[in-house]
Amino acid sequence: MEYVVLDTDVVSRTHKRTLPASLVRRLVGLAPAVSFVTAGELEKWAVIYSWGRARREALDRWVGGMPQLEYSGEVARVWGRMAGEAVRRGRPRQPNDMWIAACCIVDGLPLATLNVKDYEDFVEHHGLVLVTA
């Protein structure tokens, strides 16, 4: 089975049923996965926005049913290289985007995102593969 990592924006829009049809078509036949970062970001949102029990449980079931890319020493080294090179290029990036990209690069998986501009540097300089609308 071929996997695709869902960026946090894609998970959110999928859960809300507002994902653009063009991206839905590109994801057909691919098995979804998420990174440890997305799991953390979703938990943060649930706390900030005081989600009710039913909504949190529904999201937990949905996200919990897919593989999760975890932190590892290799992910940390790739993140560090990406972060350092981004600073040297004069284009520091958001840490969470770099963590998600590092997970994808280490595991050799594409990333489905609607935030293409957040990941363009990683595509160009590190070989990240994007699935976009």
Image (tube, rainbow, N blue to C red):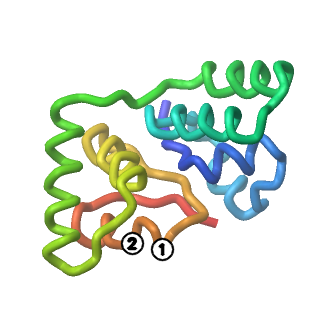
Q: Give coordinates of residue 92: x percent, y percent.
A: 28, 70
Left or right of 100 on screen, residue 106: left
Query: What percent of the width, then of the height, locates residue 103?
Result: 33, 41
Q: Residue at x 41, y 55 (%)?
A: 97
Residue wearing tag 2: 120
Q: Quadrant of residue 28?
A: top right
Q: Is residue 103 left or right of residue 73?
A: right
Asked if residue 47 lies left or right of residue 116, the reply is right
Give the crowd class for mark 1: few <14, some 14-19, many >=20 residues within 10 Å. Answer: few
Looking at the image, is 14 positioned above or below residue 25? above
Q: Residue at x 72, y 64 (%)?
A: 22
- Examine the image and state in which quarter residue 23 appears: bottom right
Residue 131 is labelled as: none
> Residue 60, how many percent across, how many down?
68, 22
Q: Amino acid at mark 2?
A: Glu
- Identified at 22% across, 80% down, the residue is 90
| Type of the residue with mark 1 | Lys
Question: Is disc 1 placed on a helix, strand or loop?
Answer: helix
> Label 1: which residue?
117
- Alpha-carbon span between mark 1 and mark 2: 5 Å
Give the x, y percent position of residue 36.
44, 32
Left of 121 or right of it: where is 88? left
